[in-house]
Image: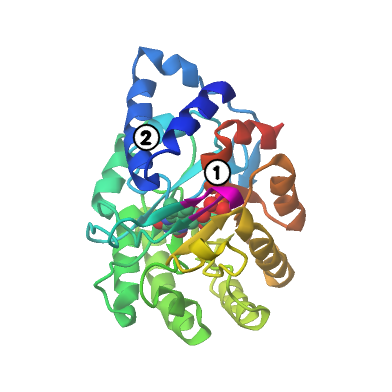
Amino acid sequence: MNNILFKLYQKIAFLGDAEKVHNISLPILEFIYKSYFGKVFHKKIISKKTKQFDISFDNPVGLAAGFDKNADYLNFLSNIGFGFIEVGTLTPKPQPGNPKPRVFRVINEQAIINHLGFNNKGIDYAINQIKKFNKNIPIGVNIGKNAKTDIKDAFRDYEYCLRKSYSVADYITLNISSPNTKNLRDLQSVNNMESFLDSIKILHNNLKKVYKKHTPLVVKIAPDIEEGPLKDLLNLVNSYDIDGIICTNTTIDKTNLDHKFKNIQGGLSGKPLYEKSNIVLNNVKKHLNDDITIIGVGGIDSASSANEKFKLGANLVQLYTGLVYKGPDLIKNILN
Ligand SMILES: Cc1cc2nc3c(=O)[nH]c(=O)nc-3n(C[C@H](O)[C@H](O)[C@H](O)COP(=O)(O)O)c2cc1C
């Protein structure tokens, strides 16, 4: 899609409710892509090859989790320039998520607040979608727990999703950092995380033997962690043979937002997250073993903001909110 077309689309799209627009636009774009008119989305992959987790990526710019939760739009999304796509967050059972409205644009700040709460069609559905997709780029599968599962039993939900996705995913992300599922972020504390990773890694090693294949395991963290607890968390990531880390998810810090947005519940993404996620990225680089892949995400909206993430130590980057405000040309601009 060229930029003029995107600007026109955005003018109309921004008049409607953010979640509704997302849910209407994507099926239409996927449909158009599959039809004769799909030629407008001609795949113009700019080759900036990189190898991470022993996987070849055509380029290091990926789509962040949450945009295509159920892997419904992979044909369209894999042809607009991304080097990889992360689907999810997926849970064992389908669930509706939190009450609506739950996605809000903060246009002046080029930001989004979302309180979706892992609305998804369940891991089985998404895995089927990925199997049907004629895979042309790496697909990461981001997993979480159902809202009704007690946090003490969270590991069982992650284990279920790990088993289901192991043979199909190119990498699997343990999302322990969404602010929209009650107590989920508690999994990031050292005591909880140690027992959590203990069980997950036993299963991960077993699956590796069963399938004779190593599917990399990645942990996604919040931007709202102080350096001390972050250091403890990273020591665990280092010692449990985790393959990658994604920094970061959305923030709960809305101090710099306009009064009318301050009290909206949910995680904030986009421009106001940028500095915060960079501070975490910088600390991650300092304390993480060198052989662990770092995926930088949070507030990328230009070539220079993406470049800064690479300079701080990211091996790959992901976008979500930048894509909503700047359109798919952002991918090309970063890569050029
Ligand atoms: C509407 C919305 C839904 C999201 N859903 C998920 C999700 O299901 N799982 C997840 O790990 N991250 C989710 N995220 C967080 C993004 O993957 C990303 O980490 C965050 O938005 C920061 O990147 P950005 O500033 O480029 O948007 C979501 C973000 C938004 C805006």
Note whether 333 is above or below 117 in the view shown: above
Whether residue 96 appears in this view of the structure is: yes
Q: Is residue 309 left or right of residue 74?
A: right
Find residue 162 and report its image quarter: bottom left
Quadrant holding the C terminus = top right
Q: Specify the label residue 330 is tagged with.
A: none
Q: Secondary structure at mark 2?
A: helix
Query: Within 10 Å of the Cα at label 2, are there few (<14), some (14-19), or many (20+) other Cα atoms?
Result: some
Number of numbered markers: 2
Query: Within 10 Å of the Cα at label 1, are there few (<14), some (14-19), or many (20+) other Cα atoms?
Result: many
Q: Position of residue 221 (x, y in %)?
A: 54, 67
Q: Circle 1 sits on which residue?
A: 62
**Amino acid type of the residue that numbered disc 2 sits on in the rendered structure:** Leu
Is-magenta flag for residue 37?
no
Q: Specify the label residue 26 is tagged with.
A: 2
Residue visible at 49% across and 36% down? 137
**Amino acid type of the residue that numbered disc 1 sits on in the rendered structure:** Gly
First reached walking from the N terminus: tag 2 or tag 1: 2
Q: Is residue 17 left or right of residue 92?
A: right
Q: Is residue 325 left or right of residue 116?
A: right
- In the depicted view, which residue is nearer to us: 1 or 311? 1
In the rendered image, the residue lying farthest to the front is 259
- In the depicted view, which residue is nearer to us: 55 or 280? 280
Boundaries of the magenta span: 105-112
